[in-house]
Image: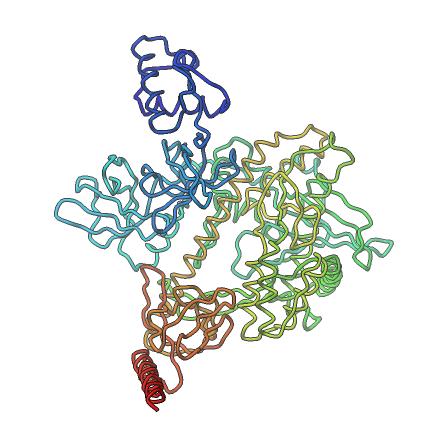
Amino acid sequence: MKKTDKRKLKIEVLKIFSSSPQKQFNYKQISKLLKIANKNERKLVNKVLYELVNSQDLKEMQKGKFILNFVSTFTTGIVNLSKKGKGIVYSSELEEEIFISQNNLNHALHGDTVELTVYARSKNLVLEGRIDNIVKRGREQFVGTVSLSLNFAFLLIKDKYMPYDIFVPGRLLKGAKQGDKAIAKIIEWPENAKSPIGEIVEVLGKSGVHEVEMHAILAEFDLPHKFPDNIKRSADRLSTKISDEEIKKRRDFRNITTLTIDPADAKDFDDALSLKILENGNYEIGIHIADVTHYVGPRTLVEKEAFNRATSVYLVDRVIPMIPEKLSNNICSLQPNKDKLTFAAVFELDSDANIKNQWFGRTIINSNKRFNYDEVQEIIDTRTGVMRKEILILNELAKKTRKKRFVTGAISFERGEIRFILDDNGKPTGVKFIEPSESHQLIEEFMLLANKKVAELIGKTKSKSSEKAFVYRVHDEPDTEKLRSFSKFIKKFGYNVSIASQKSISSSFNKLFKELGQNSESAVIQGMAIRSMAKALYTSENIGHYGLAFEYYTHFTSPIRRYPDMMVHRLLERYLQGKKSANKKIIEENCRHASSMEQRAVMAERASKKYKAVEFMNDKVGEEFQGIISSVTEFGIFVEINEFKIEGLVLIREMDDDFYSFDENNYCLLGHYTKKKYQLGSQVKIKILRANIEKRQLDFGLVTENQDNEKSKHDLKRENKSKKNKNKSRKKNRKKY
């Protein structure tokens, strides 16, 4: 071991003891394991051992022989930081969570990979520890607003997971001005300093400007807003020409009727459907997916960038693509009347949508027509229009496939989507709601079919020895307690769900959603139902997809915008060629990365919507609206405005007509004197008090009937005290007589 400081030496020593917790070591054995031969450094090892005894990390069993203290161990994990600055680290080795007090964080931040010592269990048996070393920062850069002083500044950070502002010396401001949104990176954090020292790496611009705020949101979640020049140059060098040799390798569908159905504003068309009526009366349905991996080779610059991003990001006004636009919107996009390379799942279906034959492989297509959802819906509704026959056949087959899914236990989690209408400057001028229609379901059913059958092809094996590593999209069974809680809650609205089995859960959930329709409480109940379920993620360990009721499921159909789909394409090609299994450990690591980036992208999308929601309501401060209580907490109630589906918070301290306490079991706030109840799902009238665009937060106040005549909490206390005094006086008078 090279000469090092005492702190690092302690970490290495603890690692040795932690790897052999039952074994005793003396300083000579430790020195040998650490390859320390120098006499003075071996003395330092001996000194460190006794210091670790004093800190109760080690025990001295006999003179000069040490063992790991039974309440102490050394482990690694990722920090999860609370708003108040306390930490939780989950150790996969111990399979437990370790609590880290603020004093023991050692400047670790949310998402950091750390080494830590677990030194005790608290009275309530929670493991406690201290962080010894930061192995890797979860984030290198932070976004905030510049607060300027004479010769220095602070970057004020609003991120709930970053409880510190960054001190920026004047020489490192890079021209940032007061009130600018900027990105800084931490360059130093002295041991006794409360705030880290950083430098500005990019000035985004003035707060409140649309473009600045969108870039700030991307920076907040450590997401890129543009491609590096070398990546764009690499994509630009790719040829759009398809050689005759390449065509010969593929099944040719260019003379078979093919179409795409996408949103009206879409530019990347990554899936197409082909339809051919066979001589036996059955239908050959081709589900053709853009062959991204033909153009993006492994270990190329574009591939590495796609892996790092893992997903396209959809903000309120834009798409941040996973691969450069030359590929996503041009080369790979399945534009009409152009030869395009695809990877396909082809099925022969009878009139009842039963699968008679299936084939998987690379194809070439030439789409006859590009449809948007509204155009297809009009054809379904009127039964007239271009390619009417093909669309109606596809829709009938999709409906039958969908019906079968629900019979086997699938749950229909379909919710409308809110979209903001923006002017040329990005300012929201209105809100519209997109409800899923038959045209959406048509595409969805065939994509689900392809994903399911690709997963089954690889996943269904006769023996353990023939198993092949693969990427699965899984959805675990729901937590029983959450289901019970949900069942109890909806009974208050006169609804019931059975939680006896998966089939009864799915059928009763679907029945519930149908009964709800557009009821005022439907969004609240559907939201609670979704929260009672587990989150879907990517993994190499297949456990099935509970919500879809599929034993095997993957993502094959969107390689332009999802990296796991690119992985699936490569693995499918590999296994169709009869090659051996890929490395499962590497696949699992890639799956974890993809799941993490997916969650980050979802949070960025929500943040952009929240920002636009607050901006939209900013000129409505003081106005009153009807809403529904969408969530209840100990600090107040969240209310969703019926007209706009925009949510804000009524703080409990603003509810001054009574003293309210949180009743967790009944999802309500209960008035101490009036017994007034504000319950989840109840209709209320609110007034917009504040619109904080910087924090993306709306504050509401409750508007009650005859508000001016209602008694204040002070009046209620006074009246209550008066009643008590009168009762005491009566009792005294009775005693006299």
- Outermost bottom residue: 737
Check the image and report above or below for 178 versus 674.
above
Q: Look at the image and tell me whether residue 339 can be seen.
A: no
Q: Quadrant of the N terminus?
A: top left
Q: Is residue 296 left or right of residue 603?
A: right
- Image coordinates of residue 654 in percent, x first then y, are 33, 72
Q: In which quarter of the image is the C terminus?
A: bottom left
Q: Look at the image and tell me whether residue 205 can be seen.
A: yes
- Image coordinates of residue 472 in percent, x first then y, are 63, 43
Check the image and report above or below for 627 versus 34.
below
Q: In which quarter of the image is residue 697?
A: bottom left
Choose between 681 and 239: the one closer to the eye.
681
Residue drawn at x 23%, y 51% as measured from the top left: 146
- Image coordinates of residue 591 in percent, x first then y, are 56, 40
Q: In this view, does 317 lie to the left or right of 286?
A: left
Q: In this view, does 643 lie to the left or right of 496?
A: left
- Outermost right residue: 280
- Outermost front residue: 737
- Image coordinates of residue 289 in percent, x first then y, are 64, 47
Residue drawn at x 63%, y 39% as measured from the top left: 541
Q: Quadrant of residue 372?
A: bottom right
Check the image and report above or below for 230 versus 679.
above
Choose between 294 and 154: the one closer to the eye.
154
Choose between 86 and 580: the one closer to the eye.
86
Numbered label tally: 0
Choose between 544 and 305: the one closer to the eye.
544
Q: In which quarter of the image is residue 106?
A: top left
- Outermost left residue: 150
Colour treatment of the image? rainbow
